[in-house]
Image: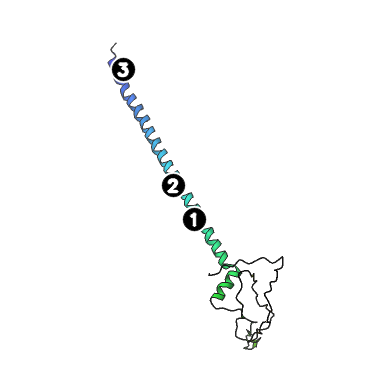
Amino acid sequence: MPSGPSTAARTPFVLLVVVLLGGGLISLLLLNSALNQGSFKLSELKRKTTELTDEQQALQRDVDNRSAPGALERRARELGMVPGGSPAFLDPDGTVRGVPGEATALPSPAPSPMEIRKPVLPSPTASPAPATAPAPAPTTGPTTEPSPPSAKPTPTTPGR
């Protein structure tokens, strides 16, 4: 029997199998490339998220530091603000409760570098400060009073 006719019948089948296998391999290669590209994009987005989270936390710390009562008081004093005295209220009928007055700054001595001061805020029940402050008593020498053990030192940053 001649071998020609049976070989010719197998050629289209072999070509079909080769084309299907080649197409499958190419499609797997494209799918793998797309997955790798998505993976690279995911890692880039995770890195950017980490950076933005760090930046947000740094900004929140900055806001918290600037919102602290001591920092607010210091910046208010730098702007020339002074603590107010006791408030006066205006009733709906037009009468004034309390004694209105101008807020005056209490003279404060220049702190020494070793001195630790606690801010003194007026109490809500205190009367308004007098217009003239009494003169401090003269001292004969330098005196240092130790701070109580329960007092925490307040950090100061000169020049800000």
Specify few, some or many for label 2: CA neighbours under 10 Å numbering under 14, 14-19, or 20 or more.
Answer: few
Residue to which mark 3 is pinned? 6
Q: Is residue 12 left or right of residue 37?
A: left
Tell me the CA gap for discs 3 and 2: 53 Å
Task: Mark 2 or mark 1: name the one nearer the start of the chain.
Answer: 2
Specify few, some or many for label 1: CA neighbours under 10 Å numbering under 14, 14-19, or 20 or more.
Answer: few
For this rendering, which residue is in front, 157 or 129? 157
Specify few, some or many for label 3: CA neighbours under 10 Å numbering under 14, 14-19, or 20 or more.
Answer: few
**SS at mark 3?**
helix
Where is residue 82, by image quadrant?
Answer: bottom right
Percent coordinates x, y for residue 155 in the rendering: 61, 66
Task: Tell me the quarter of the image containing the N terminus.
Answer: top left
**Image depth: mark 3 or mark 2 in front:** 2
Q: Is residue 147 left or right of residue 159?
A: right
Which amino acid, by three-letter code, is at mark 1? Leu
Q: What residue is rendered at 30% in x and 18% in y?
A: 7
Q: What residue is rendered at 55% in x and 65% in y?
A: 63
Residue to which mark 2 is pinned? 41
Q: What residue is rendered at 54% in x and 58% in y?
A: 57
Tell me the CA gap for discs 2 and 1: 16 Å
Q: What residue is rendered at 31% in x and 21% in y?
A: 9
Depicted 84 relative to depicted 146: above or below:
below
- The total of numbered circles placed on residues is 3
Percent coordinates x, y for residue 25 in the rendering: 38, 32
Q: Is residue 40 left or right of residue 142?
A: left
Residue to which mark 1 is pinned? 52
Outermost residue toward the top? 1
For this rendering, which residue is in front, 110 or 149? 110
Name the disc covering residue 32, or none.
Answer: none
Task: Mark 1 or mark 3: name the one nearer the start of the chain.
Answer: 3
Where is residue 111, by image quadrant?
Answer: bottom right
Which amino acid, by three-letter code, is at mark 3? Ser
